Amino acid sequence: MRSQCSHCTQVSVARELEVKGLRELIEQFYVKPDSLAIRYGMKFESALEQELLQNLGELVQAPKPQTLEATLELMQQGVPVIYQGVLKGGSGELQFSGRPDFLIRGDYRFEFSDAGLTAIQSGQWTGGYAAWDAKLSSTAKPDYQIQVGLYVDVLKELGLEAPVEHGLILGNREFARFAADAVIAQMIAKRSAYQDSVLALIQKNPKTLADLGPLVCEASSYCEMCEYPALCRHMRFENNHLQLVAGIKKAHIEALGQLGIHTIRQLAELDSGTDKHPAEVIRKLALQARLQQNFFDTGERSQVVTDPELLAELPEPNPGDLFFDLEGFTFFGEPGGLEYLWGWVDAKGDFFHHWADDRQGEEQAYEAFMQTVLLNRKRYPESRIYHYAHYEKTALKKLAARTGKFEYEVMQLIENGIFVDLYRVVENTLVISEERYSIKNLENFYEFDRSSDVKEAMGSMEFYDQYLSTLAQDATAAEKLKRQVIAYNRDDCASTLALYKWLRNLT
């Protein structure tokens, strides 16, 4: 997956080429990749291993030591399921090395039983193994299929590929099965591009940091699994890079590069369009760059109202207005995650919330929130529900469909504009001197002081994960974590109210 990031490829290859000064530079910014996604992916994989061990006993083994030679020895012995094996080789110009989660003998087939993952023997073994990987995702993403293709290619080159399907065990406990030729062909196209980039850098033979260029990542999709995201951020500031401009896209950067514009300062001085992008888009990006560059130079924050007429359409205050924020936990043990905290403040700033630890609690919280909203609407027909970004509306539609309750009411509230997304208001009417347009960044303008220890949305999920882990062992410690998450939610709701008032004052 990281090989698709040219920056990751360049840094890792240049490191092995011992480019002067690189190792010293990157060691300053090294961070071991760690996130809830990584941790829960490992938990899922470990759970599957334990289920196989419980269901199949000695038919499941791991190589000891964890080497190719020990893996090949287990395959020669005909062990039905090998977990955490090692494969090396392949048909490419560069040797591939990897650890498939499971290698299953060709006459066995994975199945899910009441006791979890197991394997059933069917037919005669004619030799060879199939490669399988466990992924917490509920879909067989192309990156995952390519990974399986790499394993299958190595098995094929070793003469150990079974004439069966290979695949993925997904987080929703379903199987995605692929023919060997299909995943190998899909993989080769990606591998060829990667090998070309590696060999091109080797041929370039860089000697110094200057030979490598700005060392800035062009994408962000893989930053959570990279050891050097802080290096990218450091180099963006060092180079006054266009990626720091809020709202800019890769296509914009490429188009501006053709005009000789590579820095925020250069963009700040531009006020014209290109053939590919309308002048309006470039003018807005140039304004964004001017405000950000001024902040970098002077430390003074500023904002510009770009559409005062649209901003003036923000609804008038109503005593029944609610300011709503929903906290969800993506890694709940069932598809769709868990909406665990429903919080809102009223027009007076009083805070209310409902908490959920499971599906039943989630449904009860959803029903209680909807009942509050509908009663409030009867009392204050002109009231609105304000939130920031689309998460709240998306979650309500999901729960309406899942539970079969309040489906019509949710649809009517959304279609009639009762939910007002203040992020869209900000996006379409303001330019601010910030790199991001999160509500935390906007708080710099209406001077909102948070009281909770949790500072970011991912932080709230981290706290909730700790809460779940602590709940069974230490109820007092769990309650403390719960209070911290609720305090974070209260801050978000209060901040949404403060944002609304600030926007009203700008009209």
Image: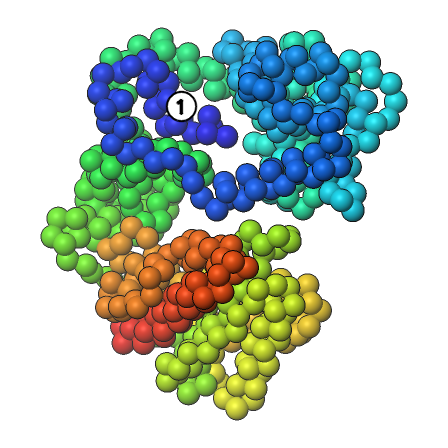
Q: Nearer the viewer, residue 362 or 431?
A: 362
Give above or below for 300 relative to 158.
below
Q: Nearer the viewer, residue 213 or 124?
A: 124
Q: How many marks?
A: 1
Q: Residue 494: image x %, image y %?
A: 36, 73
Taking the image as drawn, is residue 171 in sight? yes
Q: For the point 50% across and 42% down, which residue is it?
A: 39
Q: Which residue of the protein is positioned furthest toward the bottom in this rendering? A: 379
Q: Residue 127: image x %, image y %?
A: 78, 13
Q: Which residue of the protein is positioned furthest toward the right in this rendering? A: 123
Q: For the point 87% across and 18% down, which residue is it?
A: 124
Q: For the point 39% across and 75% down, which residue is it?
A: 314
Quarter-of-image position of residue 219: top left
Q: Residue 472: image x %, image y %?
A: 55, 59
Q: Nearer the viewer, residue 274 or 385?
A: 385
Q: Residues within 10 Å of mark 1 (few under 14, many from 20)?
A: some
Give above or below for 195 relative to 399.
above
Q: For the point 57% across and 86% down, which residue is it?
A: 375
Q: Quadrant of the C terminus?
A: bottom left
412 horizontally vs 376: left or right: right
Taking the image as drawn, is residue 178 in sight? no
* Colour mapping used in the image: rainbow
Quarter-of-image position of residue 502: bottom left
Disc 1 marks a residue whose amino acid type is: Thr
112 horizontally vs 349: left or right: right
Quarter-of-image position of residue 480: bottom left
Give above or below for 369 relative to 219.
below
Q: Which residue is mark 1?
A: 9
Q: Residue 72: image x %, image y %?
A: 64, 13
Query: Which type of secondary structure does the marked residue at label 1 adopt?
Result: helix
Q: Which residue of the protein is positioned furthest toward the left in this rendering? A: 298
